[in-house]
């Protein structure tokens, strides 16, 4: 960690107002880069697009906390201003890491020289992430389906990457079915209001979401749909119903106009269970059906892979403290599963999880080395995975935490692993987290080879972000990244 620190201001209020003004002036620059050039700006992995002044200032503060290095709007604004003056091609650029790179190198170049040389490969570039826009269809519109829809619209950019074209659902008995579907997208009790506008075109069965027209197709089964009738071609279907879990069932989605399928649940048989960042290399151009595994598998696999590579893992147990789900009952009623018939809102419910065994599909070296259970608790979202492991060598809390911190901030797994140093963190603090999991560093326990790690994860939104990353990989989306992440 760098020790570079900016002197404390003599007038904190004046300093705040100056930084506030700089953050405010960043917003149109960041927006223009995104809308006109498909350049997305980040602050240590946190998106800076469509954010408020306070959001941007808090993102800067996050870097100062986890890096113990001063990073101010005084440093980042010139970088963004210089980027906006250049004709850049599509890219993902981490402004915070650009600033820290320049500081740590004690670079003698001017900001303009530094930015121009760092981004030389994309100046005047017309190479797009995709040759043409990729059509996407959501089959089902439940918790995960609606969050993936939000993400697809949020990341629409110039409209030439992933394009949500249709949603397939069963027709309800309600006369105002379409308006009710739109209402669930507009307002969410956990994730808040949708950031944008939704127009309902009843006669056309269309939802116009932030200017994106999305056809709502009513069907009882995939066999009833011909996507070409709706101007859809070569689409990737995201099945978020969980009704079909095997190869034969999921191939039923490969109808006219649809060429590939992603399941948002663990797949059965030989279907690859993909944890993006770990085994997404299995998503090859000729692969037609994949699973994005489960939220818990996505939460634990990245951390387990890092620990395996660095320390070794002899054996362990994964205990998941999981938010209740739609599968449970609000009040006691019949349920085919053990214990799940009891009220989800009133009980902690001990149940099983396949996540520990599913790890082996992504990390074969851990086959047979992990056991697992789950406790469903009366919260609607955000879960915790407790990894109780016997490592291959002795370590310390400081060494293990620093290792994960570095992976979370500087490796290619920064989208999958987050890191918090807060001693006051609780579950609601992680609603909306985009990482697959966030290590609670203050809770880590190590004694010799024995280690216990506590990993928070938004089992809805964080998982949906992983689904979207798999979707991009399946579509062949490729973004230049700056600065380049460490492997």
Image (cartoon, rainbow, N blue to C red):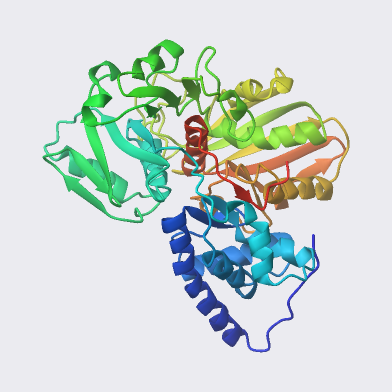
Q: Residue at x 57, y 45 (%)?
A: 435
The image position of residue 90, as x and y in percent, is 51, 50
Foreground pick, 421 / 364: 364
Q: Could you say where residue 383 lies in the image, as x and y percent from the top left? A: 54, 41
Quadrant for residue 456, please give it. top right
Percent coordinates x, y for residue 344 in the rendering = 42, 36
Residue 191 vs 216, above or below: the answer is: below
Quarter of the image that includes the C terminus: top right
Is 222 placed left or right of 384 in the picture?
A: left
- Judged left or right of residue 95, residue 333 is left
User: Residue at 19% across / 44% down in the picture?
Assistant: 179
Residue most extreme to the front: 124
Q: Nearer the viewer, residue 174 or 340?
A: 174
Q: In this view, does 255 lie to the left or right of 115?
A: left
In this rendering, the answer to whether 85 lies above or below 414 is below
Q: Which quadrant would residue 71 be assigned to in this image?
A: bottom right
């Amino acid at each position: 960690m760098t020790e570079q620190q900016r002197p404390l201001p003599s007038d904190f209020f004046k300093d705040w107002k100056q930084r506030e003004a700089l953050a405010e002036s960043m917003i149109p620059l960041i927006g223009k880069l995104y809308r006109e050039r498909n350049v997305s700006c980040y602050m240590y992995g946190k998106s800076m697009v469509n954010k408020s002044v306070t959001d941007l200032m808090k993102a800067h503060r996050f870097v100062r906390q986890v890096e113990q290095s001063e990073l101010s709007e005084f440093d980042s604004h010139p970088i963004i201003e210089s980027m906006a003056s250049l004709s850049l091609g599509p890219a993902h650029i981490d402004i915070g890491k650009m600033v820290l790179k320049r500081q740590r190198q004690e670079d003698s170049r001017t900001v303009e020289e530094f930015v121009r040389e760092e981004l030389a490969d994309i100046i005047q570039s017309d190479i797009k992430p995709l040759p043409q826009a990729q059509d996407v269809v959501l089959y089902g519109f439940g918790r995960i389906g609606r969050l993936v829809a939000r993400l697809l619209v949020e990341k629409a950019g110039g409209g030439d990457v992933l394009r949500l074209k249709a949603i397939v659902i069963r027709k309800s008995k309600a006369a105002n079915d379409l308006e009710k579907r739109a209402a669930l997208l507009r307002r969410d009790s956990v994730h808040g209001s949708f950031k944008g506008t939704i127009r309902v075109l009843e006669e056309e069965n269309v939802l116009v979401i932030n200017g994106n027209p999305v056809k709502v197709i009513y069907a009882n089964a995939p066999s009833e749909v011909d996507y070409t009738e709706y101007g859809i071609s070569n689409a990737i279907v995201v099945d978020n119903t969980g009704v079909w879990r095997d190869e034969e069932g999921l191939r039923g989605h490969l109808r006219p106009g649809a060429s590939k399928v992603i399941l948002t649940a663990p797949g059965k048989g030989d279907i690859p269970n993909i944890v993006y960042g770990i085994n997404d290399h299995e998503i090859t151009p000729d692969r037609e059906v994949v699973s994005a595994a489960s939220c818990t598998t996505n939460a634990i696999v990245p951390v387990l892979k890092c620990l395996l590579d660095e320390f070794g893992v002899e054996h362990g147990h994964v205990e998941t403290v999981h938010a209740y789900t739609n599968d449970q009952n609000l009040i006691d009623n019949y349920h085919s599963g053990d214990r799940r018939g009891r009220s989800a809102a009133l009980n902690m419910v001990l149940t099983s999880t396949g996540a520990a065994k599913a790890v082996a599909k992504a990390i074969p070296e851990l086959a047979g080395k992990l056991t697992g259970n789950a406790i469903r608790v009366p919260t609607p979202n955000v879960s915790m995975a407790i990894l109780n492991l016997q490592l291959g060598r002795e370590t310390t809390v400081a060494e293990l935490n620093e290792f994960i911190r570095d992976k979370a901030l500087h490796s290619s797994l920064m989208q999958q692993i987050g890191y918090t140093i807060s001693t006051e963190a609780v579950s609601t603090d992680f609603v909306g987290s985009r990482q697959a999991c966030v290590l609670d560093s203050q809770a880590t326990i190590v004694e010799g080879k024995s280690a216990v790690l506590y990993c928070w994860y938004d089992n809805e939104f964080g998982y949906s972000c992983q689904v979207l990353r798999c979707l991009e990989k399946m579509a062949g989306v490729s973004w230049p990244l700056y600065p380049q992440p460490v492997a």
